[in-house]
């Protein structure tokens, strides 16, 4: 990796200002922070040390410093905010090395190293204040209150102290009197001519100028200071330190502060009490997530790999015009409601065309997911021009939380109900969660953030419950910014996560089991907080995954158990690129390698509001297609298994169209099995981990599979196995569509498939059986089988068909058994494979779960037997042996 002096921006802008008569302080990201906040490129070894690049980076810094010096700069500022994070001694040494290397280039300049956003740890303070070539140190004294003690404990003489006493990240007027006290104390330590009054950090994070606010009332306005006002405050403080105190300014500041403190608009006792009552106790839904998911599935009847989107659909120019004109009273409420309703209808129709399973209304009535709620909650004020850059050219107007928060009336129920009225499919109610509202607002600084968050949680809780009353059965509570509020220092993180996750849980603690709570998270690496995410106890989470290079999946690979629904985004919405079906199917495959089929959801990475319809339509079309693959890839296929065995193994899952076997020299074979109907896939995937002949195979879906021209051969196989097409149907397909509103639901009993496979003498691994059991339970096929049969029977006279279905299975087993003479070779291999399994998995095998699984299987076999269609005794023996092998503590005996 080489670095070069590619941009002359810092120097050019310095010169430009100078030409206008302003001598500025050029600001550069410090070299160590630059490296510590970088990420190694894809494919670079994890052990690579970014700091090893320091000499190369410093060479470029030297060139820039020389240029700035030549241009006449007298000060230069390096931002090294990583100094407030948890650094080890090796990282701290890098600062010492970097600045001593730069020292000769820096000589003759005033050099400021700035830190901000938190307290600086004592060790880092020691390192920083000993840096050679540096003449000034800057600290955030708003978020870093403990830093003051370090400075009091010793500050190098002759150096400047930049005291960040005016909050650069908020919009509140400074407490000038308090700041003055701090500055006086500091002056006693560093001396009059070495103290510089400053903001706590850059002003990038605050709104620009209060004079642009035409709609804020004067009382609230008097409590605020945007960037322009903050500079006035810094000046006033500096003047006061120089004996030129503007008494009028200081006294109007004091009275504004007093009015804020005592204003009845700030305090709402009812809210204070309700929030106080929450603390100290825990709030959790009464039942666990798997019980809830079962209850929800009964109601929602979702297919495997359900598809959804994150909420917003494209925000068109027209849509923005409608909102703008409504706000400006240029169009009537009636016209506005009509326009928005039409937009929702468009989005609903599109999703139905695309065959999205869980719908959204598209959020056309919202300018922004936080501001929209801020505008409707008490205790919030909002600006007309308080824009803050979010990323690139995208901006947001964070609302201002000035008082206790409450919800005067429902905020989203009208639009959600309108949207639900347009479709039979579930329509997600769409809310922003308390932590995200908090983290993306300007928050009051007169009480702990946690307190404010609990208040918002109560307001959102009311909204959740009103949505539920309005028959909205899926409610998404976005917590996009949960990770963003995490304190930089590890020691403070647990406390934050505790109240943040608790606040989220409060919002939905009151809903029924059948109401499915979703959440969405983005913009971060979640691996280090995965346990907190699990603790949020949402039923389904859709989560950023595609931009972070699928790092998220590594936590599941490392064994973290996630039993709730999860939709790691299959494509990045921050780019106009339209991903192909193949690419998204590949992502789904990677997810299926670490997550169970029944918990996986398929969705984009984030909301679609920044995209165009020309991008969104094809992207979602491809996404839905990626969930409907008809081909599975079978890895680790034994040399002993030919097409016949593979066909036999999969024929119980559904009608097979095509089998292709590939072999790379020196490796086990891979087979591609294409079914006639994509629905057969779910059953086939259940068999992953089962044994074909003597090898445990892994089965994953593949997308856009193009069969090689071997159809001839396949037909021959079909012929050899001699299963007539009419028979070659998955068991119990007869019940398909009966009682189902969703045509995609595939009613086939995993139980039957597993029973059949076992009956043939094939081994099946424990987790495959558990998966099959979960599948059955999810679709209520075992528990309610008889009840269902009766009611179906009444409707369509099904008993006969069902019996036929079972007999087909048994006939098939019998004929396969007879024709193929499930060979001794196979049985010996099965037993060998079982031995392998037993030696590694005996603990699992004796668990209660296994026992339950066995009786489930025995029950299935018993049913088949009772139906009077018992296969040969040999089959029965093999079945029992296979089952007992599954549960045996000792390696099974050869019989
Ligand atoms: N609060 C918040 N923070 C967040 C996110 C978020 O969604 N919300 N997401 C992340 C960032 N993602 C973002 C994605 C998109 C936009 C975005 O589209 N912003 C819009 C503005 C949003 C807005 O409020 N628009 C208003 C109207 C804006 C306005 O007043 N426009 C003027 C003129 C400006 C113009 O359109 O040229 C006008 O219409 O007269 C509306 O849509 O109703 C933009 O930059 O263009 C912002 C952030 C992180 N932080």
Image (tube, rainbow, N blue to C red):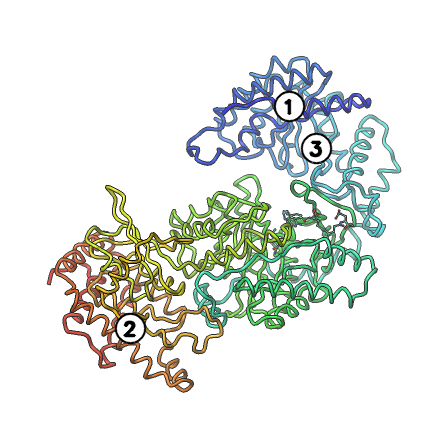
Q: CA distance from mark 1 to mark 3?
A: 16 Å
For residue 312, the mark is: none
Nearest the viewer among 257 and 581 is 581
Name which of mark 2 and mark 1 comes first in the sequence.
Answer: 1
State left or right for residue 71 relative to residue 431. Answer: right
- Position of the C terminus by quadrant: bottom left
Q: CA distance from mark 2 to mark 1?
A: 88 Å
Name which of mark 1 and mark 3 comes first in the sequence.
Answer: 1
State left or right for residue 567 relative to residue 246. Answer: left
* Quarter where residue 883 is shown: bottom left
Nearest the viewer among 712 and 94 is 712
Q: Is residue 343 visible?
A: yes
Query: Could you tell me which secondary element the residue under label 1 belongs to?
Result: loop
The residue under label 3 is 164
Q: Nearer the viewer, mark 3 or mark 2?
A: 2
Q: CA distance from mark 3 to mark 2?
A: 80 Å
The residue under label 1 is 155
The residue under label 2 is 727
Category of crowding for the residue at label 3, using alpha-carbon neighbours closer than 10 angstroms: few (below 14), some (14–19), many (at least 20): many
Q: Is residue 280 visible?
A: no
Query: Could you tell me which secondary element the residue under label 3 belongs to?
Result: strand
Name which of mark 3 and mark 2 comes first in the sequence.
Answer: 3
Query: Could you tell me which secondary element the residue under label 2 belongs to?
Result: loop
- Would you say the residues marked 3 and 2 are in contact, meaning their CB atoms lie under 8 Å apart? no
State left or right for residue 17 relative to residue 619. Answer: right
Q: Nearer the viewer, mark 1 or mark 3?
A: 3
- Would you say the residues marked 2 and 1 are in contact, meaning their CB atoms lie under 8 Å apart? no
**75 over 511 or under it: above or below:** above
**132 over 370 or under it: above or below:** above
């Amino acid at each position: 990796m080489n670095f070069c002096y590619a941009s002359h921006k810092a120097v050019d802008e310095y010169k430009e200002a100078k030409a206008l008569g302003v001598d500025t302080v050029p600001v550069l990201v410090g070299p160590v922070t630059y490296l510590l906040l970088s990420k190694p490129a894809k494919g670079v070894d994890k052990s690579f040390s970014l700091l090893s690049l320091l000499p190369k980076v410093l060479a470029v810094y030297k060139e820039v410093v020389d240029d700035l010096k030549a241009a006449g700069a007298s000060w230069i500022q390096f931002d090294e905010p990583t100094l407030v994070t948890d650094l080890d001694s090796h990282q701290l040494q890098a600062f010492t090395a970097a600045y001593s290397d730069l020292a000769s280039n820096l000589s003759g300049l005033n050099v400021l190293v700035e830190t901000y956003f938190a307290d600086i740890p004592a060790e880092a303070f020691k390192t920083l204040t000993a840096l050679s070539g540096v003449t000034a140190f800057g600290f955030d004294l708003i978020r870093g209150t403990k830093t003051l003690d370090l400075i009091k404990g010793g500050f190098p003489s002759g150096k400047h102290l930049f005291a960040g006493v005016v909050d650069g990240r908020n919009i509140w007027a400074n407490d000038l009197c308090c700041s003055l006290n701090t500055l006086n104390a500091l002056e006693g330590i560093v001396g009059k001519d070495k103290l510089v009054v400053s903001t706590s950090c850059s002003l990038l994070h605050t709104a620009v100028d209060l004079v642009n606010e035409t709609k804020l009332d004067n009382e609230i306005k008097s409590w605020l200071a945007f960037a322009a006002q903050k500079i006035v405050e810094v000046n006033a403080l500096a003047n006061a330190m120089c004996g030129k105190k503007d008494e009028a300014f200081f006294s109007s500041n004091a009275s504004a502060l007093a009015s804020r403190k005592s204003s009845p608009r700030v305090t709402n006792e009812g809210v204070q009490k309700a929030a106080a009552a929450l603390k100290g106790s825990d709030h959790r839904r009464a039942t666990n997530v798997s019980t809830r998911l079962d209850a929800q599935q009964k109601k929602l009847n979702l297919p495997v790999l359900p598809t959804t989107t994150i909420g917003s659909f494209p925000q068109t120019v027209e849509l923005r015009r409608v909102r703008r004109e409504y706000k400006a009273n240029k169009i009537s409420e009636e016209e506005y409601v009509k326009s928005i309703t039409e937009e929702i209808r468009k989005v609903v129709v599109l999703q139905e065309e695309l065959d999205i399973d869980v719908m959204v209304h598209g959020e056309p009535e919202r300018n922004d997911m936080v501001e929209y709620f801020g505008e409707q909650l008490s205790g919030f004020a909002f600006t007309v021009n308080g824009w803050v850059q979010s990323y690139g050219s995208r901006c947001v107007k964070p609302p201002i939380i000035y008082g206790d928060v409450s919800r005067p009336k429902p905020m989203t129920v009208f639009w959600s109900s309108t949207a639900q009225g347009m479709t039979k499919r579930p329509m997600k109610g769409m809310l922003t969660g308390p932590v995200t509202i908090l983290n993306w607002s300007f928050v009051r600084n007169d009480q702990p953030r946690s307190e404010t968050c609990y208040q918002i949680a109560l307001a959102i809780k009311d909204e959740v419950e009103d949505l539920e009353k309005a028959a909205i059965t899926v409610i998404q509570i976005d917590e996009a910014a949960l990770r963003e509020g995490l304190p930089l220092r590890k020691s403070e993180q647990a406390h934050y996560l505790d109240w943040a996750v608790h606040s989220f849980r409060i919002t939905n603690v009151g809903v029924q089991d059948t109401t499915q709570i979703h959440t969405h998270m983005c913009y971060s690496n979640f691996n280090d907080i995965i346990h907190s995410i699990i603790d949020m106890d949402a039923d389904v989470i859709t989560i950023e995954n595609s931009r972070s290079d699928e790092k998220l999946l590594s936590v599941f690979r490392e064994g973290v158990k996630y039993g709730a629904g999860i939709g790691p985004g299959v494509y990045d919405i921050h780019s106009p690129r339209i991903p192909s079906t193949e690419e998204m199917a590949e992502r789904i495959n990677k997810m299926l390698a670490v997550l169970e089929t029944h918990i996986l959801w398929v969705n984009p990475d984030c909301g679609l509001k920044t995209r165009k319809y020309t991008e969104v339509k094809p992207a979602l079309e491809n996404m839905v297609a990626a969930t409907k693959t008809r081909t599975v890839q079978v890895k680790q296929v034994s040399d002993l298994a030919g097409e016949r065995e593979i066909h036999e193994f999969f024929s119980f899952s559904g009608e097979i169209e095509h089998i292709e076997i590939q072999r790379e020299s020196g490796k086990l074979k891979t087979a591609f099995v294409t079914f006639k109907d994509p629905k057969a896939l779910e059953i086939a995937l259940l068999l992953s981990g089962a044994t074909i002949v003597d090898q445990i195979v892994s089965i994953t879906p593949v997308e856009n599979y193009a069969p090689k021209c071997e159809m001839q051969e396949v037909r021959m196989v079909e012929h050899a196995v001699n299963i007539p097409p009419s028979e070659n149907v998955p068991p119990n397909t007869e019940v398909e569509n009966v009682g189902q509103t969703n045509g995609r639901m595939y009613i086939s009993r995993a139980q039957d498939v597993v029973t059949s496979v076992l009956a043939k003498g094939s081994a099946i691994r424990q987790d495959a059986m558990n998966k099959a059991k979960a599948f059955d339970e999810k679709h209520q096929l075992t528990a309610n089988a008889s009840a269902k049969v009766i009611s179906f029977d009444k409707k369509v006279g099904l008993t006969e068909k069902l019996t036929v279905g079972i007999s087909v299975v048994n006939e098939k087993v019998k004929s396969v058994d007879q024709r193929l003479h499930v060979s001794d070779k196979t049985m010996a291999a099965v037993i060998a494979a079982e031995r392998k399994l037993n030696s590694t998995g005996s603990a699992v095998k004796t668990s209660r779960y296994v026992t339950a699984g066995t009786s489930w299987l025995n029950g299935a076999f018993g049913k088949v037997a009772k139906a009077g269609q018992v296969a040969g005794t040999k089959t029965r023996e093999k079945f029992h042996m296979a089952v007992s092998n599954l549960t045996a503590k000792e390696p099974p005996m050869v019989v």
